[in-house]
Image (cartoon, rainbow, N blue to C red):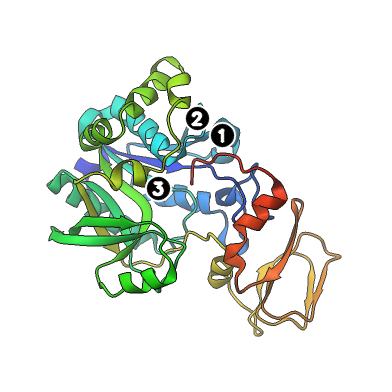
Amino acid sequence: MNADHRARLHAAILAGGSGTRLWPLSSPARPKPFVPLGPLGTLYGACVERALMLEPDSLTAVGPAALEGLCAAPGVQFLAEPAARNTGAAVALAAARAWSKTGPEGLLLVLPSDHHIPDTQAFCATIRRLAGLCRERGALGVMGIRPTGPDTSYGYIQPGAPTGEGFSVSRFVEKPGRERAELLLADPGVSWNSGMFLLPLGVLREELALHAAGFWEAAEAWLDGTEPEPYRALPSTPFDRLVMERTRRAVVLPADFPWSDVGTFPALYALLPKDSEGNAGWGPGRMEECRGCLVITTGPRTLVRGLAGQVVVESEAGLLVTPLAGAEELRGPVERLLGARPPSSLE
């Protein structure tokens, strides 16, 4: 960031999650962002490194108190939620903390903790451009990702009129079916919703008051007097639905760098290096006569043999064996296996 923006930029990393999307690697006690993913390291650690490259005035991780130890890192302050109330409340809490430091002139950068972005230079350059666009237009900004196909696991953003380097937001489309996704891709300007937001604090406070009455006040009550009840009484609503889908002051800037939220085992497999037979993974176990498999082991006396196109994940939390094709549909079965799903700040 340039000197003017850097002095007023506050970055907030949203930490949390129910731990089901990459089970049994992840768990409620160690959600996906904190799980070591072989050569990729942890997604949270990489997110912290990207944020620090922007030299923000402050860097805060927002999440449940139980994750404070996992979030500890040099340069990171931890802000505990009194209850998990999804990303709408978490963003309000981070914004109220940033406001106390710089007032309405500050910028809040909201970063999910579970993204894989290998090109950090392109990421930082895009954030700088988005900051300039939000400043110029007095708008709430979202970073769009150029789609690589009709993926049904992401939300989509339809652009409106060009504005500066980006576009006004025409509408958000939440995780469409495949046919709808294919129709959306007919518009060359459509993008995936990354969940990364750049929010001028003055504009954000006005839009929260207009569309989400009580959220700012509940956040301040917790910050000023550690009064948890107003925050606990808030509805559990994602920030996208709470504000971005309702405001008339949203802009989108499409990004061109590679991106993944590593939300499924097929997505993880795609990012990992492969051997000559197309196998990926890590661990001390042995693999023989396998092709196109993702194999992750924890014990040396584990043998995986004669499989093709399968996911095999062994951890202390359990064992998963499933075809790689279709492994993105595991959330329901895992939740049924583990019982009731806990509330999550990252939903």
Q: Quadrant of residue 206?
A: top left
The earlier-in-sequence mark between 3 and 2 is 2
Residue 125 vs residue 247, the one in the foreground = 247
The earlier-in-sequence mark between 1 and 3 is 1
Q: Looking at the picture, how far across and down is residue 228, in whole percent?
A: 48, 20
Q: Secondary structure at mark 1?
A: helix
Question: Would you say 316 lies left or right of 107 here?
Answer: right
Q: Quadrant of residue 70?
A: top right
Alpha carbon of mark 1 to alpha carbon of mark 2: how far?
A: 8 Å
Question: Would you say 216 lies left or right of 87 here?
Answer: left
Q: Which mark is residue 260?
A: none
Q: Quick check: marks 1 and 2 in contact, CB under 8 Å?
A: yes
Alpha carbon of mark 3 to alpha carbon of mark 2: how far?
A: 16 Å
Give the residue at mark 1: 68
Residue at figure coordinates x 52%, y 61% from the top left = 262
Dot 3 amino acid type: Leu
Q: Secondary structure at mark 2?
A: strand
Q: Which mark is residue 80?
A: 2
Dot 2 amino acid type: Ala
Q: Looking at the picture, how far across and down is residue 171, in whole percent?
A: 26, 56
